[in-house]
Amino acid sequence: MNQYIDSTAKIGSNVSIGYDSIILADVEIGNDCMIGHNVVIHSGSKIGQACRIDDGTIIGKKPLSSPRSIFKVPSDLKPAEIGDFCQIGANVIIYCQCTIGQRNLIADMATVRENVQLGDLNIVGRNVAIENFVTIGSRNKFETNSYITAYSQVGDYCFVAPCTATSNDNYMARDKERFNHFKGITMQDGARLGVAAVILPGKTIHSDGVVAAGAVVTRDVPAKTIVAGSPAKPFREVPEAQLLENNLDK
């Protein structure tokens, strides 16, 4: 079997590693893990117990930086850390200085950038992009092709439907004043975004707030309120049966 496993890597017991996978210096892999074919795990990355990492995935990638970028890549980024019992699909890229909690499912082709903290028991769907400097709690669901912009915060039990787009630059890359105002979105516990919703920079969806499909959010969404339209306006209260407090055991 054609593999490269650095002599300093620590591999637990009952670990399977597929063809052409590369395990670099000081990597730690816990017991009972399954590493697919053509997987690259960069130096110092830590993989917990009983994790599955599918074919073609890269763990601990260092970010690129364009000469035009306003943010430069630090030289001291820490290795990625993956918690126990995580399932990571094919062709996923998880960057360095990214901390993934336990029992997360990260589906095929998803990207999780550097400086992201992801709690436990989240579902990150196919081709989801989570940009840098994002903090995410636990038990959230991000569905296919949704986009979480940099400098965002997501609480617990949130839902993001397919093709949702979020943003952090009201100046659209013009005017130096924009450097003072970069801010992503905030989703408080239980917030939900419908299919193809668009959330403008710096907006907060308060606890149990709901954004209807196709809505464009230009102002904060009140708690326990459904907003709809473009620009989004309050439509009605969230039904009692759908409130987070009535769904924690479901």
Image (spheres, rainbow, N blue to C red):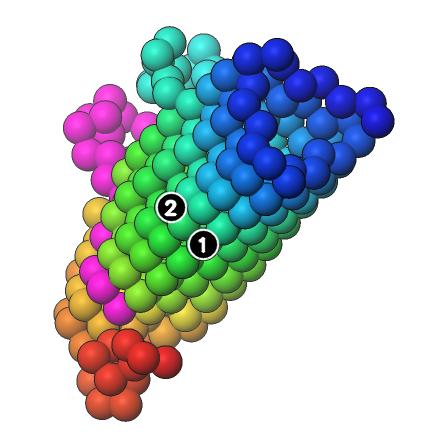
Residue at point 36%, 53% (across, down): 120
Q: Amino acid at mark 2?
A: Gly
Q: Give the vertical position of 95 relative to 73 (above or below).
A: below
Q: Is residue 172 visible?
A: no
Q: Nearer the viewer, residue 172 or 242?
A: 242
Q: Nearer the viewer, residue 158 or 151?
A: 158
Q: Amino acid at mark 1?
A: Arg
Q: Is residue 27 visible?
A: yes
Q: Main secondary structure of the magenta part?
A: loop
Q: Nearer the viewer, residue 77 or 8?
A: 8
Q: Which residue is mark 1?
A: 103
Residue at point 38%, 27% (across, down): 97
Element marked by disc 2: loop
Answer whether labels 2 and 1 touch (C-beta < 8 Å): yes
Element marked by disc 1: loop
Which residue range is magenta in the image?
A: 166-190
Q: Which residue is mark 2?
A: 101
Residue 197 pos. (x, y %): 40, 63
Residue 74 pos. (x, y %): 35, 13
C-alpha distance separating marks 2 and 1: 7 Å
Residue at far front of view: 13
Q: Quadrant of the C terminus?
A: bottom left
Q: Give the vertical position of 93 relative to 126 (above or below).
A: above
Residue 170 included in the magenta stretch of the image: yes
Q: Is residue 120 left or right of residue 56?
A: left
Residue 72 pos. (x, y %): 36, 14
Residue at point 49%, 43% (across, down): 49
**Residue 152: quadrant of the picture:** top left
Specify few, some or many for label 2: CA neighbours under 10 Å numbering under 14, 14-19, or 20 or more: many
Residue at point 27%, 60% (across, down): 156
Q: Quadrant of the N terminus?
A: top right
Residue 49 included in the magenta stretch of the image: no
